[in-house]
Amino acid sequence: MNTSVYPQSRHLMGPGPSDVHPRVLAAMANPTVSHLDPEFILMMDNLKDMLRYAFQTENELTIPLSGPASVGMESCFVNLIEPDDKVIVCQNGAFGGRMRENVERIGAKAVMVTDDWGCPVDPQKVSDALSCNPDTKAVAFVHAETSTGVQSDAATICAIARQNNALSIVDCVTSLAGSPVLTDKWEADAIYSGSQKCLSCTPGISPLTLSPRAVDVLRNRKKKGQSWFMDLNLLMDYWGEGSSRSYHHTAPINSLYGLHESLTLLQEEGIENAWQRHSSMHLALRHGIEALDLSFLVAENDRLPQLNTICIPDSVNEADVRSYLLSKYNLEVGAGLGILDGKVWRIGVMGQSAKKENIILFLSGLEDALEKQGLRIKKGESVYAAQRALGS
Amino acid sequence: MNTSVYPQSRHLMGPGPSDVHPRVLAAMANPTVSHLDPEFILMMDNLKDMLRYAFQTENELTIPLSGPASVGMESCFVNLIEPDDKVIVCQNGAFGGRMRENVERIGAKAVMVTDDWGCPVDPQKVSDALSCNPDTKAVAFVHAETSTGVQSDAATICAIARQNNALSIVDCVTSLAGSPVLTDKWEADAIYSGSQKCLSCTPGISPLTLSPRAVDVLRNRKKKGQSWFMDLNLLMDYWGEGSSRSYHHTAPINSLYGLHESLTLLQEEGIENAWQRHSSMHLALRHGIEALDLSFLVAENDRLPQLNTICIPDSVNEADVRSYLLSKYNLEVGAGLGILDGKVWRIGVMGQSAKKENIILFLSGLEDALEKQGLRIKKGESVYAAQRALGS
C-alpha cells in the first residue's frame, strides 16, 4: 500500500509519459534560480545545442517551449499561418484532427488529406492536393502518430511540400530520439516534440525547431500572431543567440533542469544507439506478441518501434487487462484513442522504457492477464520468444 | 566555484521566482506517473481543493494550468472574450500593457484606463469608463503590479464591474498567498496567478479560478476560442468534477507534485499567518530601507508587502549593485521593468523568501554594496532597524 501522498512508482509503457531516469528526477530537485541568472543563461545555450543534436539540425531557432507538446503544435500554426492562409493537413489519426482544429481556430483554411487510422500518410495524395491548391502556405502532418503507431515518410512529404513552395510542419512528438528525426536532411521547416516520450523527461516541455525559411515567414508576418504567450518573435528576444535576454515569461527552471539531464543522457548514449535500442526492443516485443497469437494494427513496414498498437482479441475485456497490469504489475499500458478506443492497446517502448526488463515484465504480465480472461496461454512462450530475439 | 552543471543555490529576492522550500524540490523528484493514473487523479482533486483555499473560493472551476502565468492571463481572455467585445483594461504598470496585447490579439477592443506607474488603479476612472461604455464585457486589472509594487483595490473595482454587468478579470500573480486574495468576497469572475511568487513553488504552473458567472459565459460562447491548448471547455473534460477525465494534453506531473507540496505548506502555516508573515517582513525591510535613507517608489498605503520598489540613489550604478549582491552574497534582487528600468530595484519578499534571514542578508549586503559605490553608510544601522521592527 502506498502511504505517500505522491503516486507510487510505475513501469510506464503507455503512450507517454515514459519511465524517467533517476538522474532526470534528481536534476528536477536542483535549487531554483531566476530565469535571468547568469548561470541559467549559460544552461540555456547548452540546452539549445543539445536539442539541435536531438533534432539533427543546425537551425538557430531550436528551443524548449514552456508547455506540453500541444503548445509546440499551436506555436507552429499561430506563428507561421495567418488568417485566410491555406494549409494542407494530413490526417491519419487523432493528432491530424488536432492540427485541423488549430488551423481553423486561426481563421485559416484546412484542406484535408485523409488516410485510414493505422495507415501512413500517402505522399501521392499530398502531391495531388498541392496540385489542386497551388496557393498552399504549408503542409502539416504527423511523423509518428501516437494514436495508431504509424510512421509516415517525412522525408518524402517534406520534399513534396518544398517543391511546391509550401512550408512543412511536422509533429515528431513520439518520434524524437526514438527513431530518426532528420530535420536538416528532410529540409523540414517546423518540427515540434514533447519531453515525455522518447526523451524520457518529465512532461511539460515542448522542443521546437524552425528552419531559416520558417524564421523568414515568422519575421515577415503581415500582422501579429493571435497568441501573446506563443509569439516566437517576442520569445526569441529571450532565447535567441546574442539576444537581449528580455523577460517574456518566467521559464520553468526546474523542468528545464530535467530536460537538460535527459538530453545529456541522450548524448552519452549516442542518438544512433538510442534509435537502435528502440528498434531492438520493438523486435523483441513483436516476437513476444506473435508468440501469443496477437496481431498488430499496423503493417510491419509502417510500424513505429516506440508505439505499438496491439489488436484486442475478441472475448477480452481490454480495460480489465489494463487494470490488472496496473494493480498486479505496477505496469501502465495505454487504451486506444478516438475511433480505436476499445480496439487496441497502445504499448509504449519509449526512451528509458525501451529496455529488456520492461519487455519481459510486460509480456509476463500480459500472459497472466490474458489467462485470467479465459484465453489459453502457453505460459512463458512470449518471454522466451523475446529473449531469443534479443540474442539471449 | 560551482562545478555542477546546474546553477548554484541562490537567495531569491527578485520579482520571482522566490526561494523554493526543500520539500517542494523533493516532491518534484517523485516518480513520474501517467496523467490518467488513478493515484494521480486522486491528487488532482486534492490540488483543486487546496487551490480553492489559496484563492479563498468555492468556485468549481479552480485548476492549475500547464504553463506560466502568461498562460493564465491569456486563458482568461481567449475564453471569456470574443472578437469585437469591449474590455476595459486598467494599466498602471507593465502587466496592464500585456493585458491590452491579449485583448487586441483576439480582435476585441481595449478601452484603456491609465494611471501612473507606481500608483494604484483609480476606481473612479473605471466607473467613468463604464458609464461611457455600457456595452463593456469585462474589466481587467492587475491586483498586484509586479513591475511597480503597487496594490490596487480589487474589492472596489470588482464591485464596480459587477454593478455594470461586466465580468472582472484580475491578475493576482504576485498577490496570491502573500496578501489577501478574496475571490468569493470580492465576487471576482476570473483570477489567475503563478506558482513561483508567494506560493514559492517552481515556475511553470498557473493557478486559475472562474466564478459560476464566468463559467456561464465560457459555456455559451458564440464561437470556439482561438486557442485549442487554452480551451477551458475542453480542459474541463479532464479536470472537471465528475468529468470523463478525457485526455486533453499530458499534464506536467512532476511540476504538479511541486505545487501540491507548496499548497500543503500553505495549509500547514494557515493562509492568514502567511499574509501576516509577509506584512511583518515588509515592515522590517521598510525600517531597514529608511535607516539607509532610501525611499520607496510607492506611497505607504499602496505598497505590496511582497514586492518592494526602492528608488536608486543618484550616483549609484544599479546594475553593479545587483551584480555585487549576486556574486558576493548569492542574493538576487530585481531590476526595474519597462519605464522603471534603471530607476528602481525590485525586492521580492515572497513566500519562502519572506523570512528574517533573507531580510538581514539583503540589508547587510546592500549596506556593503552601497558603500562600495561610495555612499556613506552607517554599517549595521539598517539591520538593527529591521531587528527592532521584528521585536528582537
Image (tube, coloured by chain):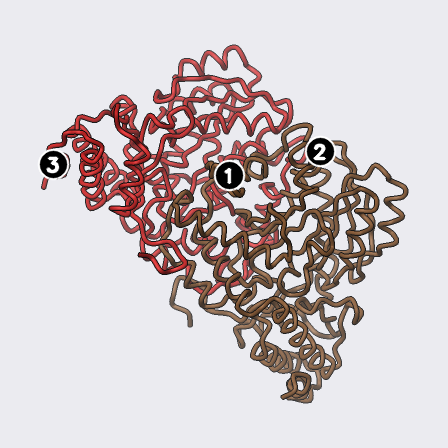
Chain colours: A red, B brown
Q: SS for tag 3?
A: loop
The nearer-to-camera label among 2 and 1 is 1
**Mark 2 on the same chain as mark 3:** no
Q: Which residue, given by chain and number where applicable, does mark 1 sit on?
A: B243
Looking at the picture, how far across and down is residue B338, in whole percent?
Answer: 71, 56
Q: How many marks?
A: 3
The chain ID associated with circle 3 is A
Residue B82 seen: yes
Q: Nearer the viewer, residue A221 or A275?
A: A275
Residue B269, by quadrant, is bottom right
Which residue position holds label 2? B82
SS state under label 2: loop
Residue A38 at least partly seen: no
First in sequence: mark 2 vs mark 1: 2
Badge 1 amino acid = Ser
- Residue B210 to residue A140: above or below: below
Label 3 – label 1 distance at C-alpha: 39 Å
- What is the chain identity of the residue bearing mark 2? B
Q: Amino acid at mark 3?
A: Lys
Q: Write down the quadrant of residue A26 in the picture.
A: bottom left
